[in-house]
Amino acid sequence: MTSGNPTAARSMSLSRAFRWPITLVLGAVAVAVSAQFSVPLPFTPVPMTLQGLAVILVGGLTGSTAGAGAMLLYLTAGAFGAPVFANGSGGLQHLLGPTGGYLLVFPLAAWIVGWVGRRGNLGLCLLAALMGMVAIHVGGLAQLAMLTGSIKTAATAGTAPFLMVDSLKVALAGLLLWRAHHSLRPRA
């Protein structure tokens, strides 16, 4: 392809070098935008957002390493005050408060989805989406339990209200990931 053409090889190498940071930034931006679709619920300090769906899609579409990297960039930007969290907010207090457990596990969730769903078959894409969402909920439940002193209170406020909607997000994400993998495969 580039046999004997050092300029073409160097150009291809530069293209790859730019793809990585662009992928990270676009993944972080996707989750930041999804956070702005936020519905506060009166009975919980945790708003309903599209972040979980976005984290799953970023991890599944970019792969485990890039997905986790994009989420680390997202969290770093938010911790330093960029308005990337729900309702255009930012700051370290979000990582330490009631939503922090969900947020802090985003890199792990994206990594899980990217790794489990990498083969692209429907079953694995659905399993990857489910595992990513479970990881997010376990992180949120753990931090809420620490803050409230009760796992029952944490589950009532931070897990139960979201089960139906997040089940739909898992199904949608799994199908979208499968379709993306299917569409991107070279045809024989």
Image (tube, rainbow, N blue to C red):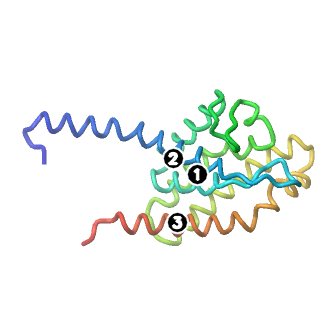
Q: Which residue is mark 3?
A: 125
Query: Is 46 left, or right, of 178 in this rendering?
Result: right
Element at label 3: helix
- The vertical placement of 98 against 76, above or below, is below
Residue occupying image coordinates x 25% and y 37%: 13
Which callout, 1 or 3, points at the residue further toward the start of the chain? 1
Which callout, 2 or 3, points at the residue further toward the start of the chain? 2
**Residue neighbourhood size for the residue with mark 1, other residues' Cα within 10 Å, grouped as few (<14), some (14–19), many (≥20):** many
Q: Position of residue 110 (x, y in %)?
A: 56, 50
Looking at the image, do the residues carrying marks 1 and 2 touch, with CB atoms under 8 Å apart? yes
Q: CA distance from mark 1 to mark 3?
A: 14 Å
**Mark 1: amino acid:** Val
Q: Position of residue 86 (x, y in %)?
A: 69, 44
**Residue neighbourhood size for the residue with mark 2, other residues' Cα within 10 Å, grouped as few (<14), some (14–19), many (≥20):** many
Element at label 1: helix
Foreground residue, 52 or 6?
A: 52
**Mark 2: amino acid:** Gly
Q: Position of residue 169 (x, y in %)?
A: 63, 64
Q: Which residue is mark 2?
A: 67
Query: Is 117 left, or right, of 77 in this rendering?
Result: left
Q: The C terminus lies in which quarter of the figure?
A: bottom left
- The vertical placement of 92 against 146, above or below, is above
Query: Is 148 left, or right, of 130 in this rendering?
Result: right
Q: CA distance from mark 2 to mark 3?
A: 15 Å
- Residue ranking furthest to the left: 4
Element at label 2: helix
